[in-house]
Image (cartoon, rainbow, N blue to C red):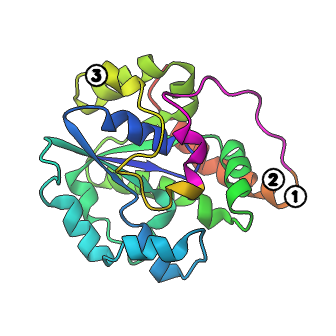
């Protein structure tokens, strides 16, 4: 199985990658299209030069690698994708050969968290519209997209991971609930900027509190992202 997890930034996506990496039957790939995305957009992201050096492939080479042999020889592989990377020119052909899962989080939480590390963010940076478009693309392939809410995972990690595994045709592995602290060999090179707080953890964080109150530009970003988020939320796995 090639399991493609489609998420926006600051959305439990790295924790989910860590969870699947604990399974003996899975390898993981961290944001494979990040290099082509930065080259094509010219965006000045944190650690840009290091990211480009670590991801030298063009977009077609990335797609071919995702469909090729699984590097560690495991029967399954987990692709951690950022929806905002899927701009025009990034191929979507591999999606037809993957089990596609969409990881969602309320836009207010995404915007509040992402703005701390990248204050210049725009709607394109958080990817809600692209996530909804990818959701529609998966349906056009004849697949039924699977949607899981990060809030539900934090409320009940074991229960929701069991439901996710069942939905994709896997047996649940309790090893998914914990991971060792510290950096991981499969982390992207950008981990020192984005994953520091997660490296101090050994499992999923608990339930979140009230939604953050945002104003100005950040509140506008939330407002324009809500319709796409709500459309996917209507299709999420039940709690």
Q: Quadrant of residue 33?
A: bottom left
At 25% across and 61% down in the image, what residue appears?
94
Say whether marks 1 and 2 touch (CB < 8 Å).
Answer: yes
The residue range painted magenta reads 194-214
Q: x, y (%) of residue 6?
A: 42, 50
Q: Quadrant of residue 145?
A: top left
Which secondary structure, mark 1? helix
Examine the rendering and report whether any part of residue 235 can be seen. no
Quickly name the residue at label 2: 219
Relative to 234, is 185 above or below? Answer: below
Checking the image for residue 173, the label placed there is 3
**Residue 195 located within the stretch drawn in magenta:** yes
At 84% across and 41% down in the image, what residue appears?
213
Q: x, y (%) of residue 82?
A: 46, 57
Relative to 205, is 11 above or below? Answer: below
Of residues 218 and 175, which is closer to you in this image? 175
Relative to 106, is 227 above or below? Answer: below
26 left or right of 181 in image: left
**In which quadrant is the N terminus drawn?**
top left
42 left or right of 225 in image: left
Quickly name the residue at label 1: 216
Examine the rendering and report whether any part of residue 209 can be seen. yes
Of residues 112 and 30, which is closer to you in this image? 30
């Amino acid at each position: 199985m090639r399991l493609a997890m489609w998420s926006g930034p600051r959305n439990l996506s790295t924790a989910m990658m860590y969870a699947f990496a604990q399974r003996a039957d899975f390898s993981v790939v961290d944001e494979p299209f990040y290099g082509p995305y930065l080259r094509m957009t010219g965006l000045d992201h944190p650690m840009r030069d290091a990211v480009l050096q670590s991801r030298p492939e063009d977009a077609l080479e990335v797609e071919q690698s995702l469909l090729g042999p699984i590097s560690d020889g495991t029967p399954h592989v987990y692709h951690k994708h950022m929806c905002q990377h899927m701009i025009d020119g990034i191929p979507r052909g591999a999606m037809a050969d993957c089990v596609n899962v969409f990881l969602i989080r309320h836009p207010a939480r995404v915007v509040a968290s992402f703005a701390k590390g990248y204050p210049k963010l725009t709607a394109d940076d958080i990817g809600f519209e692209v996530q909804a478009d990818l959701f529609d693309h998966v349906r056009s392939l004849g697949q039924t997209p699977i949607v899981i809410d990060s809030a539900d995972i934090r409320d009940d990690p074991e229960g929701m991971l069991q439901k996710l595994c069942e939905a994709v045709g896997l047996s649940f592995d309790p090893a998914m609930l914990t991971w060792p602290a510290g950096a991981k060999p499969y982390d992207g090179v950008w981990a020192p900027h984005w994953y520091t707080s997660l490296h101090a953890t050994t499992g999923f964080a608990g339930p979140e509190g009230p939604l953050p109150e945002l104003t100005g530009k950040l509140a506008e970003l939330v407002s324009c992202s809500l319709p796409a988020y709500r459309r996917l939320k209507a299709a999420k796995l039940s709690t």
